[in-house]
C-alpha cells in the first residue's frame, strides 16, 4: 500500500527527473540526438568524441535539405483522398523532413480544401491555378475527329476512353506541370495522388538520393500500357528520334521500352501516379522538344496518350539508364497494384503490407525488364 505522502514524493521525483531530461534536449539539440547520448550526459561521460551531428536517420527533424517539393494535381472533390494520402506521407516521412507542398488545379481551390490540407502539415503549402492553355484542349485539335475517337473508345470499353478532362490531365502532366510558376524554384518533385497508400516508414530522404546519386527519375511500379490508348504513339516516337538523333542519350534505357532495338514498343512504362523526379530534366531541350512534337500529333486527344508512357519514353531515351532509380524500399499502393518491400527492407521500414502481395514479378509487371538493363 502506498501512503498519500509517499505518492506525493514519487510524483515529485518524476517531475524533477523529467525536467532534468528535457533540459538536456533543449540545451543540446545537436548533441542529445539519441537515448545513448542523453545517458552519457547523465552519467557525466568524459568522452572526447565530437558530438554527433544530424543524420537523416536520427528521428529528429533536420528540415528540408534538398531543393524539392511535393506536387499534387487535384480537384476540390479529391479532398478526402488527398487528405488520406497526405496524412500518410506526413506520418511515414515528411513530419521529419518538412518538404513543402504545391497543389495545382485548373479551377480555384475552395477555402475548405485549402484549410483542410494546410492543417495536415507544418511545412509550407502553396496553391496554384493552371494557366488556361496548359490545361484545356488546344484549338488546333479537330473536334470532329476527337469526338469520333472518344466514341469509338467508349464502345471498346477503354478505361477513361470517353473523358476529355482525363485527356487534359494526361497532357498537362506530360508537358506542363513542370513549367508551372510555383515549381520554378524547385529542382526535384515527388508526385502524390489521392487515395494512395504508403506502407513503410522512410528512414532516409529520397530527394537526397536523387541529388547525391544524380538520378533524374524514380519509380516503384512499372507495367504494360493498354494498346488501345496509344496505337500510333511509337510511330511518333520513331519519327522524333529519326529527326533528332542527337537528342537521344547514348547510354539510354531503350531496352526497357523495346525488345527489338526500337522497332516496336513493348508497352512498358513506369506508373506515373508515383514519381520522384528532376524537374530540370523535363525542362531540358530534349524532353521539351519531344513533348512539343507529340503534342502536335494530337494523340493526347485523337487517342488517349497517358503521361505515364510519355514520361517513361522520355526518361528512357533522354536520360542515362543509371539515372532511373527503382525505390525498392518505398511500400506503395495505387489501386489495383502495390509494391511491398521484401525482407530485410520490410522489417526495417516496419511495413504493414503483406510481402506476398507484391506486384514486382507478376506477369503484368515490367520490373524484370528494368533489372535486365543492368545485367
Ligand atoms: N485539377 C484536376 N485534377 C485532376 C483531374 N482529373 C484528374 N486529376 C488529378 O490527376 C491525377 C490523376 O487522376 P486519377 O483520376 O487518379 O487518374 P488515374 O490514376 O489514372 O486513375 P484512378 O486513380 O484509378 O482513378 C490525380 O492526382 C487527380 O487528382 C481534373 O479534371 N482536374
Ligand atoms: C476534321 O476531321 C474530320 C473527321 O476525321 C474530317 O472529315 C475533316 O476534314 C477534318 N477537318 C479539318 C478542318 O481538317
Ligand atoms: C532550386 O532549383 C531550381 C531549378 O534548378 C533553381 O532555379 C533554384 O535556383 C534552386 N534553388 C536553390 C536554393 O538552390
Ligand atoms: Mg489515380
Image (cartoon, helix red, strand yellow):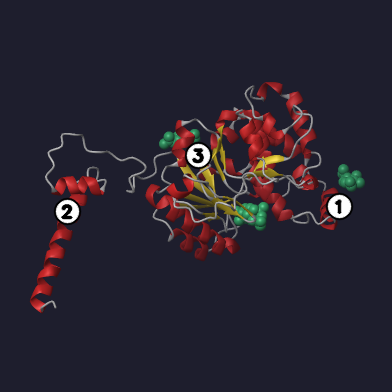
In what quadrant of the picture does the N terminus appear?
Answer: bottom left
Judging by the rendered image, the residue that carries numbered circle 3 is 188
The mark found on residue 23 in the picture is 2
Q: Residues within 10 Å of mark 2 (few under 14, many from 20)?
A: few
Q: Is residue 222 visible?
A: yes
Residue at 17%, 45% in the rendered image: 40
Secondary structure of residue under mark 1: helix
Q: Residues within 10 Å of mark 3 (few under 14, many from 20)?
A: many
Foreground label between 3 and 2: 2
Between the C-alphas of marks 1 and 2, the distance is 71 Å
Residue at 64%, 32% in the rendered image: 372
Image location (x, y in percent) of residue 345: 47, 45
The front one of 130 and 7 is: 7
Secondary structure of residue under mark 2: helix
Image location (x, y in percent) of residue 134: 65, 46
Foreground label between 1 and 3: 3
Callout 3 touching callout 2 (CB < 8 Å): no
Between the C-alphas of marks 3 and 2, the distance is 38 Å
Judging by the rendered image, the residue that carries numbered circle 1 is 148
Image location (x, y in percent) of residue 66: 42, 39
In what quadrant of the picture does the C terminus appear?
Answer: top right
The mark found on residue 43 in the picture is none
Question: Which residue is most to the front?
Answer: 1
Residue at 77%, 38% in the rendered image: 233
Q: Is mark 1 within 8 Å of ligand 2?
A: yes
Q: Residues within 10 Å of mark 1 (few under 14, many from 20)?
A: few
Amino acid at each position: 500500500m502506498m501512503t498519500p505522502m509517499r505518492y506525493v514524493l514519487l510524483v515529485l521525483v518524476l517531475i524533477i527527473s523529467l525536467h532534468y531530461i528535457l533540459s538536456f534536449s533543449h540545451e543540446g539539440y545537436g548533441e542529445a540526438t539519441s537515448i545513448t547520448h542523453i545517458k552519457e550526459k547523465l552519467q557525466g561521460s568524459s568522452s572526447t568524441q565530437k558530438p554527433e551531428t544530424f543524420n537523416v536517420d536520427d528521428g529528429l527533424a533536420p528540415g528540408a535539405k534538398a531543393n524539392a517539393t511535393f506536387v499534387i494535381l487535384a480537384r476540390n472533390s479529391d479532398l478526402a483522398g488527398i487528405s488520406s494520402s497526405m496524412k500518410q506521407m506526413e506520418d511515414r516521412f515528411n513530419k521529419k523532413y518538412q518538404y513543402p507542398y504545391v497543389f495545382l488545379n485548373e479551377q480555384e481551390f475552395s477555402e475548405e480544401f485549402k484549410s483542410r490540407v494546410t492543417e495536415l502539415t507544418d511545412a509550407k503549402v502553396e496553391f496554384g491555378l493552371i494557366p488556361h492553355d496548359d490545361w484545356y484542349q488546344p484549338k488546333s485539335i479537330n473536334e470532329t475527329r476527337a469526338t469520333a475517337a472518344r466514341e469509338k473508345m467508349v464502345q471498346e470499353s477503354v478505361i477513361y476512353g470517353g473523358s476529355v478532362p482525363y485527356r487534359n490531365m494526361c497532357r498537362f502532366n506530360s508537358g506542363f506541370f513542370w513549367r508551372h510558376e510555383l515549381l520554378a524554384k524547385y529542382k526535384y518533385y515527388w508526385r502524390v495522388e489521392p487515395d494512395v497508400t504508403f506502407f513503410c516508414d522512410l528512414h532516409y530522404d529520397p530527394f537526397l538520393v536523387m541529388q547525391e546519386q544524380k538520378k533524374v527519375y524514380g519509380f516503384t511500379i512499372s507495367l504494360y500500357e493498354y494498346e488501345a490508348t496509344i496505337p500510333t504513339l511509337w510511330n511518333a516516337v520513331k519519327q522524333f528520334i529519326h529527326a533528332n538523333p542527337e537528342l537521344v542519350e547514348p547510354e539510354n534505357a531503350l531496352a526497357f521500352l523495346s525488345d527489338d532495338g526500337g522497332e516496336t514498343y513493348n508497352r512498358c512504362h513506369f506508373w506515373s501516379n508515383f514519381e520522384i523526379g528532376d524537374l530540370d530534366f523535363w525542362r531540358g531541350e530534349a524532353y521539351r522538344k519531344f513533348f512539343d512534337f507529340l503534342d502536335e500529333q494530337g494523340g493526347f486527344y485523337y487517342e488517349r496518350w497517358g503521361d505515364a508512357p510519355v514520361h517513361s519514353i522520355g526518361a528512357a531515351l533522354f536520360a542515362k539508364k543509371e539515372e532511373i532509380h527503382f525505390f525498392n524500399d518505398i511500400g506503395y499502393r495505387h489501386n489495383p497494384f502495390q509494391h511491398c518491400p521484401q525482407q530485410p527492407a520490410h522489417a526495417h521500414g516496419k511495413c504493414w503490407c503483406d510481402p506476398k502481395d507484391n506486384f514486382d514479378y507478376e506477369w503484368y509487371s515490367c520490373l524484370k525488364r528494368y533489372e535486365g538493363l543492368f545485367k
